[in-house]
Image (cartoon, rainbow, N blue to C red):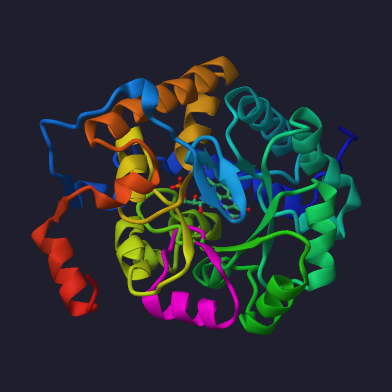
Protein backbone atom coordinates (compact mmCIF):
# COMPACT_ATOMS: atom_id res chain seq x y z
CA UNK A 1 0.00 0.00 0.00
CA UNK A 2 1.43 3.40 -0.91
CA UNK A 3 2.10 5.79 1.97
CA UNK A 4 -0.93 7.92 2.68
CA UNK A 5 -0.73 11.41 4.06
CA UNK A 6 -3.44 11.39 6.68
CA UNK A 7 -6.00 14.06 5.72
CA UNK A 8 -9.05 15.21 7.67
CA UNK A 9 -11.12 12.66 5.72
CA UNK A 10 -8.73 9.84 6.55
CA UNK A 11 -8.68 10.94 10.19
CA UNK A 12 -12.50 10.70 10.26
CA UNK A 13 -12.27 7.06 9.12
CA UNK A 14 -9.93 6.30 12.02
CA UNK A 15 -12.22 8.12 14.45
CA UNK A 16 -15.31 6.22 13.28
CA UNK A 17 -13.51 2.95 13.79
CA UNK A 18 -12.12 3.83 17.21
CA UNK A 19 -15.40 5.23 18.53
CA UNK A 20 -17.46 2.33 17.10
CA UNK A 21 -15.19 -0.07 18.98
CA UNK A 22 -15.28 2.00 22.17
CA UNK A 23 -19.08 2.25 22.11
CA UNK A 24 -19.65 -1.42 21.20
CA UNK A 25 -22.25 -3.06 23.43
CA UNK A 26 -22.50 -6.82 23.92
CA UNK A 27 -26.26 -6.60 23.99
CA UNK A 28 -27.96 -5.75 20.71
CA UNK A 29 -31.09 -3.59 20.77
CA UNK A 30 -32.05 -4.57 17.23
CA UNK A 31 -35.23 -6.31 18.40
CA UNK A 32 -34.31 -9.95 17.78
CA UNK A 33 -35.43 -10.82 21.35
CA UNK A 34 -38.94 -9.68 20.36
CA UNK A 35 -39.21 -12.60 17.92
CA UNK A 36 -39.85 -16.07 19.31
CA UNK A 37 -39.38 -18.95 16.89
CA UNK A 38 -41.91 -21.70 17.48
CA UNK A 39 -40.11 -24.99 18.11
CA UNK A 40 -41.26 -27.99 16.09
CA UNK A 41 -40.18 -31.38 17.50
CA UNK A 42 -40.16 -33.35 14.23
CA UNK A 43 -38.10 -31.35 11.73
CA UNK A 44 -37.49 -34.50 9.58
CA UNK A 45 -34.18 -33.32 8.13
CA UNK A 46 -30.49 -34.33 8.00
CA UNK A 47 -28.02 -31.54 8.72
CA UNK A 48 -25.91 -32.71 5.75
CA UNK A 49 -28.77 -31.81 3.44
CA UNK A 50 -28.95 -28.19 4.55
CA UNK A 51 -28.02 -25.65 1.87
CA UNK A 52 -27.09 -22.23 3.29
CA UNK A 53 -26.86 -20.46 -0.06
CA UNK A 54 -29.02 -17.46 -0.86
CA UNK A 55 -29.75 -15.13 -3.75
CA UNK A 56 -29.32 -11.39 -3.39
CA UNK A 57 -28.66 -8.56 -5.83
CA UNK A 58 -28.22 -10.90 -8.78
CA UNK A 59 -25.63 -12.97 -6.90
CA UNK A 60 -25.64 -16.37 -5.27
CA UNK A 61 -23.97 -16.12 -1.87
CA UNK A 62 -22.78 -19.46 -0.46
CA UNK A 63 -23.35 -18.14 3.08
CA UNK A 64 -26.33 -15.89 3.87
CA UNK A 65 -24.34 -13.51 6.10
CA UNK A 66 -21.49 -11.28 4.94
CA UNK A 67 -18.96 -8.74 6.17
CA UNK A 68 -20.77 -5.41 6.05
CA UNK A 69 -19.37 -2.04 4.93
CA UNK A 70 -17.01 -0.45 7.40
CA UNK A 71 -13.78 0.98 6.36
CA UNK A 72 -10.86 2.05 4.19
CA UNK A 73 -9.42 5.47 3.39
CA UNK A 74 -6.58 5.69 5.90
CA UNK A 75 -3.43 3.66 6.36
CA UNK A 76 -4.79 1.91 9.44
CA UNK A 77 -8.19 1.10 7.96
CA UNK A 78 -6.53 -0.15 4.75
CA UNK A 79 -4.75 -2.79 6.83
CA UNK A 80 -8.04 -3.74 8.45
CA UNK A 81 -9.65 -4.06 5.00
CA UNK A 82 -6.82 -6.39 3.95
CA UNK A 83 -7.40 -8.61 6.98
CA UNK A 84 -11.17 -8.69 6.45
CA UNK A 85 -10.63 -9.56 2.78
CA UNK A 86 -8.36 -12.47 3.70
CA UNK A 87 -11.00 -13.80 6.06
CA UNK A 88 -13.73 -13.31 3.42
CA UNK A 89 -11.61 -15.27 0.91
CA UNK A 90 -10.96 -18.09 3.39
CA UNK A 91 -14.59 -18.44 4.44
CA UNK A 92 -16.31 -17.69 1.12
CA UNK A 93 -18.17 -14.71 2.59
CA UNK A 94 -19.12 -11.70 0.52
CA UNK A 95 -17.68 -8.43 1.79
CA UNK A 96 -18.55 -4.77 1.43
CA UNK A 97 -15.86 -2.09 1.66
CA UNK A 98 -16.51 1.17 3.50
CA UNK A 99 -17.37 4.38 1.67
CA UNK A 100 -14.87 4.90 -1.14
CA UNK A 101 -15.76 8.54 -1.77
CA UNK A 102 -12.48 9.61 -0.14
CA UNK A 103 -10.67 7.94 -3.07
CA UNK A 104 -12.36 10.38 -5.48
CA UNK A 105 -10.73 13.31 -3.66
CA UNK A 106 -7.50 11.63 -2.59
CA UNK A 107 -6.22 9.15 -5.19
CA UNK A 108 -3.66 7.69 -2.74
CA UNK A 109 -6.57 6.35 -0.69
CA UNK A 110 -7.59 4.00 -3.53
CA UNK A 111 -5.04 1.40 -2.46
CA UNK A 112 -6.85 0.96 0.89
CA UNK A 113 -9.81 -0.37 -1.12
CA UNK A 114 -8.12 -2.10 -4.07
CA UNK A 115 -6.22 -4.22 -1.55
CA UNK A 116 -9.52 -6.01 -0.91
CA UNK A 117 -9.71 -7.22 -4.52
CA UNK A 118 -5.99 -8.00 -4.57
CA UNK A 119 -6.26 -10.23 -1.51
CA UNK A 120 -9.53 -11.83 -2.65
CA UNK A 121 -9.42 -11.91 -6.48
CA UNK A 122 -12.39 -14.25 -6.94
CA UNK A 123 -14.59 -13.22 -4.01
CA UNK A 124 -17.85 -11.28 -4.01
CA UNK A 125 -17.17 -7.63 -3.19
CA UNK A 126 -19.60 -4.76 -2.76
CA UNK A 127 -18.37 -1.25 -3.52
CA UNK A 128 -19.75 1.56 -1.32
CA UNK A 129 -20.52 5.24 -1.85
CA UNK A 130 -22.88 7.89 -0.46
CA UNK A 131 -26.05 8.78 -2.33
CA UNK A 132 -25.05 12.32 -3.36
CA UNK A 133 -22.64 11.15 -6.06
CA UNK A 134 -22.93 10.98 -9.85
CA UNK A 135 -23.17 7.85 -11.98
CA UNK A 136 -19.62 8.47 -13.26
CA UNK A 137 -18.23 8.56 -9.72
CA UNK A 138 -20.16 5.43 -8.76
CA UNK A 139 -18.91 3.55 -11.84
CA UNK A 140 -15.31 4.59 -11.13
CA UNK A 141 -15.53 3.22 -7.61
CA UNK A 142 -17.16 -0.01 -8.77
CA UNK A 143 -14.38 -0.47 -11.34
CA UNK A 144 -11.75 0.36 -8.71
CA UNK A 145 -12.48 -2.87 -6.81
CA UNK A 146 -14.07 -4.82 -9.69
CA UNK A 147 -17.19 -4.94 -7.53
CA UNK A 148 -20.03 -7.41 -7.99
CA UNK A 149 -22.57 -4.88 -6.68
CA UNK A 150 -22.65 -1.35 -5.27
CA UNK A 151 -23.96 -0.37 -1.87
CA UNK A 152 -25.29 3.16 -2.15
CA UNK A 153 -25.63 4.39 1.41
CA UNK A 154 -28.34 6.80 2.51
CA UNK A 155 -27.31 8.31 5.84
CA UNK A 156 -29.34 11.50 6.33
CA UNK A 157 -29.34 11.25 10.14
CA UNK A 158 -25.58 10.74 10.25
CA UNK A 159 -24.89 13.63 7.84
CA UNK A 160 -26.99 16.04 9.89
CA UNK A 161 -25.47 15.03 13.22
CA UNK A 162 -21.92 15.17 11.76
CA UNK A 163 -20.63 18.76 12.15
CA UNK A 164 -18.93 18.61 8.73
CA UNK A 165 -21.77 16.54 7.22
CA UNK A 166 -23.80 17.24 4.07
CA UNK A 167 -26.58 19.79 4.45
CA UNK A 168 -28.13 19.08 1.05
CA UNK A 169 -29.99 15.80 1.19
CA UNK A 170 -31.61 15.91 -2.27
CA UNK A 171 -30.45 12.49 -3.42
CA UNK A 172 -33.31 10.95 -5.39
CA UNK A 173 -32.18 12.00 -8.89
CA UNK A 174 -28.65 10.72 -8.21
CA UNK A 175 -29.97 7.39 -6.97
CA UNK A 176 -32.22 6.96 -10.03
CA UNK A 177 -29.36 7.84 -12.38
CA UNK A 178 -27.04 5.32 -10.72
CA UNK A 179 -29.65 2.55 -10.55
CA UNK A 180 -30.44 3.00 -14.25
CA UNK A 181 -26.90 3.35 -15.53
CA UNK A 182 -24.50 1.33 -13.38
CA UNK A 183 -22.88 -1.86 -14.73
CA UNK A 184 -23.66 -3.87 -11.56
CA UNK A 185 -26.71 -4.19 -9.24
CA UNK A 186 -27.29 -1.33 -6.78
CA UNK A 187 -28.20 -1.97 -3.15
CA UNK A 188 -29.58 1.13 -1.42
CA UNK A 189 -28.44 0.90 2.19
CA UNK A 190 -29.08 2.69 5.46
CA UNK A 191 -26.32 2.95 8.06
CA UNK A 192 -28.05 1.89 11.28
CA UNK A 193 -31.20 4.03 11.34
CA UNK A 194 -33.51 1.53 9.62
CA UNK A 195 -36.07 2.00 6.85
CA UNK A 196 -39.83 2.59 6.75
CA UNK A 197 -42.39 1.20 4.34
CA UNK A 198 -42.73 4.73 2.90
CA UNK A 199 -38.98 4.93 2.16
CA UNK A 200 -38.96 1.44 0.67
CA UNK A 201 -41.98 2.28 -1.50
CA UNK A 202 -40.33 5.45 -2.75
CA UNK A 203 -37.15 3.52 -3.57
CA UNK A 204 -39.21 0.91 -5.41
CA UNK A 205 -40.90 3.61 -7.49
CA UNK A 206 -37.44 4.95 -8.33
CA UNK A 207 -36.51 1.55 -9.78
CA UNK A 208 -34.53 0.22 -6.81
CA UNK A 209 -34.80 -3.57 -6.42
CA UNK A 210 -32.29 -4.24 -3.66
CA UNK A 211 -32.15 -2.60 -0.25
CA UNK A 212 -30.33 -3.03 3.02
CA UNK A 213 -32.60 -1.82 5.82
CA UNK A 214 -29.64 -1.47 8.23
CA UNK A 215 -31.57 -0.80 11.40
CA UNK A 216 -30.97 0.64 14.84
CA UNK A 217 -29.70 -1.61 17.60
CA UNK A 218 -26.02 -2.16 16.86
CA UNK A 219 -23.46 0.39 15.72
CA UNK A 220 -25.07 3.75 16.35
CA UNK A 221 -23.90 6.64 14.18
CA UNK A 222 -25.98 9.14 16.16
CA UNK A 223 -23.86 8.28 19.20
CA UNK A 224 -20.62 8.04 17.21
CA UNK A 225 -21.05 11.46 15.58
CA UNK A 226 -22.13 12.98 18.87
CA UNK A 227 -18.97 11.77 20.51
CA UNK A 228 -16.99 13.39 17.67
CA UNK A 229 -18.79 16.69 18.36
CA UNK A 230 -17.30 16.77 21.88
CA UNK A 231 -20.20 18.83 23.26
CA UNK A 232 -22.64 16.06 22.34
CA UNK A 233 -25.34 18.64 21.54
CA UNK A 234 -27.56 16.13 19.75
CA UNK A 235 -27.30 13.25 22.21
CA UNK A 236 -31.10 13.17 22.40
CA UNK A 237 -31.06 11.56 18.93
CA UNK A 238 -29.42 8.36 20.19
CA UNK A 239 -32.58 6.35 19.71
CA UNK A 240 -33.52 7.78 16.31
CA UNK A 241 -34.77 5.35 13.71
CA UNK A 242 -36.35 1.92 13.38
CA UNK A 243 -34.66 -1.18 14.76
CA UNK A 244 -33.52 -3.87 12.34
CA UNK A 245 -36.49 -6.07 13.26
CA UNK A 246 -39.00 -3.20 12.89
CA UNK A 247 -37.43 -2.35 9.52
CA UNK A 248 -37.78 -5.93 8.28
CA UNK A 249 -41.46 -5.84 9.27
CA UNK A 250 -41.82 -2.48 7.50
CA UNK A 251 -40.39 -4.12 4.37
CA UNK A 252 -43.22 -6.71 4.43
CA UNK A 253 -45.56 -3.95 3.31
CA UNK A 254 -43.72 -3.62 -0.02
CA UNK A 255 -43.67 -6.50 -2.49
CA UNK A 256 -40.93 -7.59 -4.87
CA UNK A 257 -37.95 -6.07 -3.13
CA UNK A 258 -34.90 -8.13 -2.25
CA UNK A 259 -33.75 -7.25 1.22
CA UNK A 260 -30.56 -7.37 3.19
CA UNK A 261 -30.64 -6.79 6.93
CA UNK A 262 -27.91 -5.38 9.11
CA UNK A 263 -27.70 -3.59 12.44
CA UNK A 264 -27.00 -5.31 15.75
CA UNK A 265 -26.53 -8.84 14.43
CA UNK A 266 -24.56 -10.63 17.15
CA UNK A 267 -25.30 -14.36 16.81
CA UNK A 268 -26.24 -16.99 14.21
CA UNK A 269 -29.69 -16.94 15.82
CA UNK A 270 -30.02 -13.24 14.91
CA UNK A 271 -29.06 -14.16 11.33
CA UNK A 272 -31.70 -16.89 11.33
CA UNK A 273 -34.38 -14.56 12.67
CA UNK A 274 -33.57 -11.89 10.06
CA UNK A 275 -33.85 -14.50 7.29
CA UNK A 276 -37.14 -15.79 8.72
CA UNK A 277 -38.44 -12.20 8.69
CA UNK A 278 -37.72 -11.97 4.97
CA UNK A 279 -34.09 -10.94 4.57
CA UNK A 280 -32.27 -12.53 1.65
CA UNK A 281 -28.89 -11.77 3.19
CA UNK A 282 -27.56 -10.43 6.48
CA UNK A 283 -24.66 -8.01 6.99
CA UNK A 284 -22.51 -7.95 10.10
CA UNK A 285 -20.26 -4.94 10.72
CA UNK A 286 -19.51 -3.85 14.31
CA UNK A 287 -19.57 -7.30 15.86
CA UNK A 288 -17.02 -8.83 13.45
CA UNK A 289 -14.88 -5.71 13.78
CA UNK A 290 -14.92 -6.12 17.53
CA UNK A 291 -13.82 -9.79 17.31
CA UNK A 292 -11.01 -8.85 14.89
CA UNK A 293 -9.74 -5.91 16.92
CA UNK A 294 -9.95 -7.48 20.36
CA UNK A 295 -8.39 -10.74 19.12
CA UNK A 296 -6.81 -11.41 15.73
CA UNK A 297 -7.46 -12.65 12.21
CA UNK A 298 -7.34 -16.35 13.12
CA UNK A 299 -9.94 -15.81 15.84
CA UNK A 300 -12.35 -14.05 13.45
CA UNK A 301 -11.74 -16.73 10.82
CA UNK A 302 -12.61 -19.53 13.28
CA UNK A 303 -15.49 -17.48 14.64
CA UNK A 304 -17.06 -17.13 11.17
CA UNK A 305 -16.51 -20.83 10.44
CA UNK A 306 -18.36 -21.59 13.70
CA UNK A 307 -21.25 -19.33 12.64
CA UNK A 308 -21.46 -21.19 9.32
CA UNK A 309 -21.70 -24.58 11.03
CA UNK A 310 -24.03 -23.29 13.75
CA UNK A 311 -26.33 -21.87 11.12
CA UNK A 312 -26.63 -25.31 9.49
CA UNK A 313 -27.81 -26.67 12.85
CA UNK A 314 -30.32 -23.83 13.18
CA UNK A 315 -31.70 -24.42 9.66
CA UNK A 316 -32.12 -28.09 10.62
CA UNK A 317 -33.73 -27.20 13.96
CA UNK A 318 -36.38 -25.27 12.07
CA UNK A 319 -36.81 -28.03 9.47
CA UNK A 320 -35.40 -25.79 6.71
CA UNK A 321 -33.38 -27.34 3.89
CA UNK A 322 -32.85 -23.99 2.19
CA UNK A 323 -32.85 -20.28 2.96
CA UNK A 324 -36.16 -19.98 1.10
CA UNK A 325 -37.69 -22.64 3.42
CA UNK A 326 -37.08 -20.34 6.40
CA UNK A 327 -39.95 -18.14 5.22
CA UNK A 328 -42.44 -20.77 6.43
CA UNK A 329 -41.06 -20.92 9.98
CA UNK A 330 -43.67 -19.85 12.54
CA UNK A 331 -42.92 -17.01 14.93
CA UNK A 332 -44.64 -15.07 17.69
CA UNK A 333 -43.99 -11.36 18.24
CA UNK A 334 -43.66 -9.68 21.64
CA UNK A 335 -46.55 -7.43 22.71
CA UNK A 336 -44.40 -4.33 22.10
CA UNK A 337 -43.62 -5.42 18.55
CA UNK A 338 -47.27 -6.37 17.90
CA UNK A 339 -48.25 -2.92 19.04
CA UNK A 340 -45.71 -1.37 16.64
CA UNK A 341 -47.10 -3.49 13.77
CA UNK A 342 -50.69 -2.49 14.57
CA UNK A 343 -49.91 1.22 14.65
CA UNK A 344 -47.97 0.93 11.40
CA UNK A 345 -50.56 -1.34 9.71
CA UNK A 346 -48.02 -4.12 9.18
CA UNK A 347 -48.57 -7.86 9.06
C1 LIG B 1 -19.91 1.55 9.23
N1 LIG B 1 -21.00 1.56 8.38
C2 LIG B 1 -20.85 2.05 7.09
N2 LIG B 1 -21.82 1.87 6.17
C3 LIG B 1 -21.67 2.30 4.89
O1 LIG B 1 -22.55 2.07 4.07
N3 LIG B 1 -20.53 2.98 4.53
C4 LIG B 1 -19.51 3.21 5.42
O2 LIG B 1 -18.50 3.80 5.07
C5 LIG B 1 -19.66 2.74 6.76
N4 LIG B 1 -18.70 2.96 7.69
C6 LIG B 1 -18.76 2.30 8.90
C7 LIG B 1 -17.66 2.33 9.77
C8 LIG B 1 -17.67 1.57 10.93
C9 LIG B 1 -16.47 1.59 11.83
C10 LIG B 1 -18.80 0.79 11.26
C11 LIG B 1 -18.83 -0.07 12.49
C12 LIG B 1 -19.90 0.80 10.42
C13 LIG B 1 -22.33 1.05 8.78
C14 LIG B 1 -22.44 -0.45 8.68
O3 LIG B 1 -22.26 -0.90 7.36
C15 LIG B 1 -23.82 -0.93 9.19
O4 LIG B 1 -24.83 -0.42 8.37
C16 LIG B 1 -24.07 -0.49 10.63
O5 LIG B 1 -22.86 -0.44 11.34
C17 LIG B 1 -25.01 -1.42 11.36
O6 LIG B 1 -24.47 -2.72 11.46
P1 LIG B 1 -23.72 -3.29 12.78
O7 LIG B 1 -22.42 -2.55 12.92
O8 LIG B 1 -24.61 -3.03 13.95
O9 LIG B 1 -23.48 -4.74 12.49
Say if the magenta span includes residue 199.
yes
Q: Residue at x 44, y 49 (%)?
A: 219
In the image, residue 116 sits, relative to residue 249, either above or below, namely above
Say if the magenta span includes residue 256.
no
Question: Considering the image in quadrants, where does the C terminus appear?
Answer: bottom left
Residue 279, percent from left and from top: 41, 54
Q: Residue at x 19, y 32 (%)?
A: 43
Residue 242, percent from left and from top: 34, 65
Can you see residue 267?
no
Residue 166, percent from left and from top: 65, 74
In the image, residue 114 sits, relative to residue 327, either above or below, namely above
Q: Residue 112's image quarter?
A: top right
Q: Residue at x 84, y 46 (%)?
A: 110
Residue stretch in magenta: 191-211
Q: Nearer the viewer, residue 227 or 340?
A: 340
Q: Residue at x 35, y 52 (%)?
A: 217
Q: Nearer the viewer, residue 51 or 296?
A: 51
Amino acid sequence: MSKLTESAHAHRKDEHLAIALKQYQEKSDAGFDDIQIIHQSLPEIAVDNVDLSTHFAGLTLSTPFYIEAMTGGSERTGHINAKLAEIAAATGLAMAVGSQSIALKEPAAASTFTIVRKVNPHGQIFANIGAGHSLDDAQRLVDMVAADALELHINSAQELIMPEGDRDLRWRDHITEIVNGLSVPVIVKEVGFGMSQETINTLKQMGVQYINVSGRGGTNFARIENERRHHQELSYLSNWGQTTVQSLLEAHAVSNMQIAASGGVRTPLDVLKALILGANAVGVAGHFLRVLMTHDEETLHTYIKDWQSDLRLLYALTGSHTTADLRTVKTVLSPALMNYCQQRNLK
